[in-house]
Every structure is written in C-alpha cells, then in structure tokens.
Amino acid sequence: MKKPLLLLLFIFPIFAFTSSCSNQKKAKQPVSYRFDHGRTAMLKNGIAYAPRNAPAAVKRAIAAGNRLQRMPYKWGGGHANHHDNGYDCSGSTSYVLREAGLMKGSLTSRGFFEYGKKGKGDWITVYVRNGHVFMTVAGLRLDTGGSRDSTGPRWKTVTRASKGHVVRHPSGL
C-alpha cells in the first residue's frame, strides 16, 4: 500500500509541472514595433510616451519603464530591492508591473510562466522562456537582451525573435 502512494507522490508533481507548461500559449511571431497613433507608445530619445487613450495602468507601466532606461544590467537586480542600482530581465519586468499596480512582489523568469492570463494582451504582453523574460507595453518592447549595443533594461524597436517564448498578460490588459 505504501509503494503506490509513494509512486503517486513522486509522479503527481512531474505531471502537474509538465501539464501546466504544455497548457501555455506559444508566441507565434517575432516581436516587432510599428507606430500606430493612438494605439502604440511613441519612442523619442529613449523615452516612451503612452497613447492618450491608454489605460492608467499602461501609463504607469511606461513611466516605470522610463525610470529604468539608464540602469545597468545587474544579475538578481530588482528582486531584493525594489529600487535597485541595476536590474536583470525578471527584476525589470517585475518592477514595471509592480509600479503599474499589476502585481505584488517580484518573480524570477520561471515564475512568469504562471503570471496573469495566458495569451497575448491588448496592452501589455509578457514573453517568457526558461532563463529570460521581456515585455511589450503599448507595443513597445522593454528588454535587457536582444542587442549588443546596450546593457540593462531598455525600450527597443528592433524586431526580436520570440521562438521558444510563451505569452502571458495582466488580466484585463
């Protein structure tokens, strides 16, 4: 009687983990920026400007992303200290979502597999794969990777491949 119970206790966590990963929505296209007046954020000299009709949480997210623009990349940055002297990918994504009022605490990149709702959002989308996370806010990508020109969280308009990523979004956005 004890062996079947032990076997069940061993197999159930493996099944639960694999079933939740296979239940994700995979990113289908590269992440590209195209300015669409009233729908996407505008980028001027490294500063993003939210569309006037964007929800308040989106405007707060863009303002938070703007505060990170001169920050360097720092492994683990943004986790122990909300206002840190550098941010990694998950720390910067967590910072923006916290400042927008869309989450509490911080998540590792792996933790974002369970964030919000599955699928692409209308205003904010989080792209997650093992070891990396980035996001788009009003169509503009905030990312610590994808370019050799800069380190740290930056707004980026250059197209980035999304192969291997799943997409999540805050509820209602």
Image (cartoon, rainbow, N blue to C red):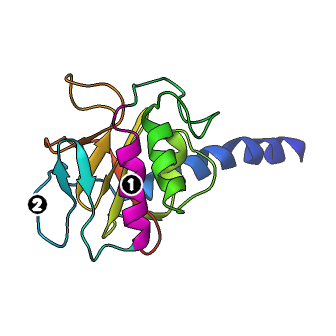
Q: Where residue 154 appears, x then y in whole percent?
A: 30, 38
Expressed as whole percent of the image width and height from the top left, the position of residue 131 reads: 43, 32
Q: Which residue is mark 1?
A: 63
Quadrant location of the C terminus in the rendered image? bottom left
Give the x, y percent position of residue 2: 89, 43
Q: Amino acid at mark 2?
A: Phe
Part of the protein shown in magenta? 56-70
* The quarter of the displayed image where residue 153 is located: top left
Chief SS of the magenta region: helix
Residue 161 circle label: none
Disc 2, SS: loop
According to the image, label 2 marks what residue? 35
In front of the other: 159 or 84:
84
SS type, badge 1: helix
Point 72% across, 41% down: residue: 10
**Residue type at numbered disc 1:** Ala
In percent of width and height, residue 128 lies at: 39, 45
In the displayed structure image, the side of residue 117 where residue 52 appears, left or right: left
Q: Give the image quarter of residue 23.
A: bottom left
